[in-house]
Amino acid sequence: MKKLSLLILSIFILFALSFSIISCSQSDNPENESGTDTGLESGTLDGEEHLSPESGTVKFPDAEKTEAPTEEPTEAPTAAPTETETEEITTEKQTEAETEPPTSLKFTSYGNGTCAVTGIGNYPDVYVIIPEKSPEGDVVTVIDDKAFYENSSIKAVQIPSTVMSIGKMAFGNCSSLIYISVDSENNMFTDVNGILYSKDKTKLYVFPAANQAAEITLSISLSEIADMAFFSTPSLKQIKYGGTISDWSKIKIGEKNYGLYSASLSFAIIE
């Protein structure tokens, strides 16, 4: 009987030890009874909700997320222009420079191959040389009315052979004008000591305001003095006329010739 009791006690102890071993083994194993990872069937490991077949929803702590550093875009280095490109750029600049209008007087075209000088434009010099042709290729045949009117900068003007007409007061009140010269081949105009006349000297167009002559002799052939020809002539003191007082009275004298009357007038022939 005693032996039977000891046998039963031994079996009970063995059973208890076996149960304890099995329990420890299950607690150390991360897998559940079905052998699958807990919560991996219905979620992710990045802080999302996971479902456990035993206890429902389980939340895992958010894992630290490390974002890859964003590199700032860098501009690709600009390649230096090749020799051909440099030549093309230079050629383009030269072409642009060639197409720019040159510094010149102001012209108005008549549309028939001729034109008129109408103003000083952007002419850079005080010594004005009127060309035979405009930059556009029109022949310069006219100096327009008041083309240089009241210009206080110009000192001298050269008129080409092509000019056939000079308008009213074209050089009126040009206070710094000293001298006007005309090409010897011009068939319509001429100059005498810087004074502008018609070719036959019957009309006096301009006695330059800054001309330093104190005395002038006018021919008996003179029949007309243009408007403002003697507008302001501070140096002119004496005018000698080759005819009589009666001849003088026949001369057509234009407007605003104040300098003509401020000078002393004498006659070659006394009636």
Image (tube, rainbow, N blue to C red):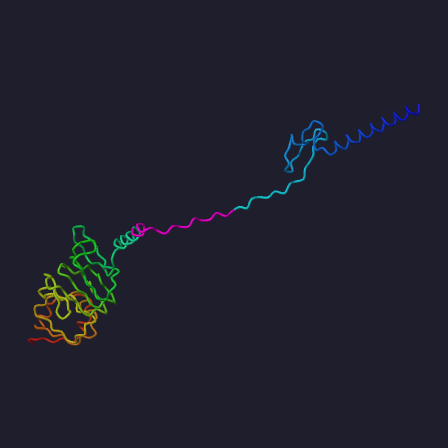
Question: What residue sits 14% from the left and 71% below the top?
Answer: 193
Image quarter for residue 236? Answer: bottom left
Residue 154 found in image quarter: bottom left
Quarter the N terminus occupies: top right
Tell me if residue 109 comes above or below residue 271 in the rendering: above
Q: Please name whichever residue, 231 or 68, is drawn nearer the observer in this view of the structure.
A: 68
On the image, the x and y values in percent for residue 239 come to 14, 74
In this rendering, is residue 84 above or below 270?
Answer: above
Horizontal and vertical percent for residue 263? 17, 75
Most prominent secondary structure in the magenta stretch?
loop
Give the extent of the magenta segment: 71-87
Q: Nearer the viewer, residue 229 or 10?
A: 10
Q: Would you say residue 261 sits in the magenta stretch?
A: no
Magenta span contains residue 80: yes
Q: Quadrant of residue 59?
A: top right
Where in the figure is residue 57, as x and y percent of width and height? 69, 32
Give coordinates of residue 99: x percent, y percent: 26, 53
Give the number of marks: 0
Quarter of the figure that contains the C terminus: bottom left
The answer to whether residue 150 is left or right of residue 49 is left
